[in-house]
Amino acid sequence: MNTTRSTKLHLATGMLTVLLITGCSTKQVPVSVPVALPSSFSMSGTVEQAPSWWLSFNDPMLNELVGQALGNNFSLMSSWDRLSQARAVYRKTSADLFPTLDGEASGSHRAAESDDTTVKTDQLALGLSAQYELDLWGRIGSTTDASLLDMQATEADLDAAAMTLTAEVATTWYQLVEQTCAIRLLEKQIETNMKGLEIVTAQFKTGQVSIADVLQQRQLVESKTGEKIQKEAERKQLEHQLTILLGLVPGAKSYEIPSELTLLPALPETGIPTELIRQRPDIRSAFLAVEAADKRVAAAIADRFPALRFTVSLETSGNYGGDIFSNYIASFASSLVGPLFDGGKRKAEVERTKAVAAEQLHDYAQAILVAAGEVEDALIQEKQQLQYINSLKLQLDLATQSMGQVKERYLKGVENYQRVLSALTSLQALQQSELTAQTNILVNRVQLCRSLGSGWDYSGNLRHI
């Protein structure tokens, strides 16, 4: 009866303490967008972004490569490992919200001999102890919330890593296609230059031109041959880069390269700049980092207040026989522990966490500005690149006509070889420039899709905890 009254007294005291001191608690201000964004981007298409952005390129080989990279890339696997770590930290931290229960068992054997008589005693002791801290100020809850936000930020980081990987695969693939097409173009140019060399050599033998014309034509052939050698080396390097992105050893995979670059897909809808905050995984991660830092500020402030802890224990002992549960001791204790002097340690921690929160907020603002800048850069680059490609096509048409006219005049003997060589060099350089420009606009579109951050959710199929 006395034990029951004592237990009730402890509970009443504890509840009264809670009611007296829970009037003040740490409150957090919702995180708002720290920068002002325009109402729209400078350009926008009318086509909705594909569920997986790379599908818009209608390139079966690219689709296959992206699928392999998402499944086998080791850097992406490391991102998965970091997510597993964040999940474990969250489960570990959230365990503090629940009571802990410890069990203890001990046994002893004693033998005493007196007057040729041996007395043996066997004892067994069992005990249970439960401890629980009442989260008066939200310290434990804030710490748990922070670890949950960290986990969600790591999920966003995984999304960002996967999106960056797909962009790297697409970029490397189209650069590889460009190098292969450039090699084929050089082979055609070398063939054309060899035919020119045959003509000039025949004219030299008949005394129509000087040896200088022959040597210059030979130099042009060798120049294109040297360019081809360099392109072949660059092509091999790109193959190695792409194979590594797929999680394979360089040289372990061969590629069937198409004879031409894929067509540029229609410009997707860019939406409004504020959508970047929701769509871009790196911005989402930065936002969650701000919220997590804010939670840690609340936890640091709460740590300066007293902590209320409860302990319940039950112990029993006896012989190994049936009397072990006949006698037991039960106890209940509550304690209110608060810091009186710590040399400013807790205050300094509050200041530190506030500074971290301010840093994360600034990083969040910077991430938004960078993202908006990347979209605008990609849009203006595409607009200018399209104009440049149109200019190159016009230049190519004019260079082709000029080459035909100069070559005809040269064969009639009314034009010198320098004009022919200049026209041919200009034409072949423009052919290469057009190929590079077509590749650059594809790569730029890849970067635009990555910058928009829409069209997919890599971690969307994750099991929620």
Image (cartoon, rainbow, N blue to C red):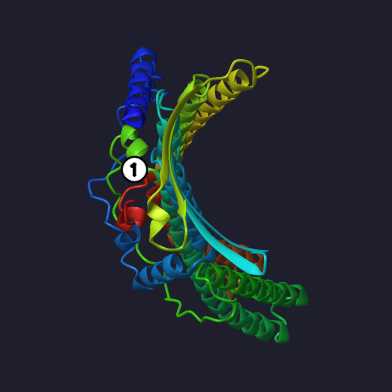
Closest to the observer: 186 or 233? 233
Give the crowd class for mark 1: few <14, some 14-19, many >=20 residues within 10 Å: some
Closest to the observer: 60 or 184? 60
How many numbered marks are there? 1
Q: Residue 322: x and y, percent?
A: 38, 61
Q: Is residue 170 above or below residue 339?
A: below
Closest to the observer: 364 or 53? 364
Q: Residue 68: x and y, percent?
A: 43, 71
Residue drawn at the location 53% of the way across and 69% of the way down:
242
Question: Is residue 390 in view?
Answer: no
Which residue is tagged 1? 279
Which quarter of the figure has residue 423? bottom right
Q: Amino acid at mark 1?
A: Gln
Position of the N terminus, as image quadrant, is: top left
Question: Is residue 453 in view?
Answer: yes
Residue drawn at the location 39% of the way across and 38% of the way down:
97
Q: Is residue 212 above or below residue 458?
A: below
Asked if residue 277 lies left or right of residue 293, the reply is left
Asked if residue 208 lies left or right of residue 20, the reply is right
Residue furthest to the front in view is: 115
Q: Residue 345: x and y, percent?
A: 64, 22
Q: Residue 290: x and y, percent?
A: 46, 31
For mark 1, give the secondary structure: helix
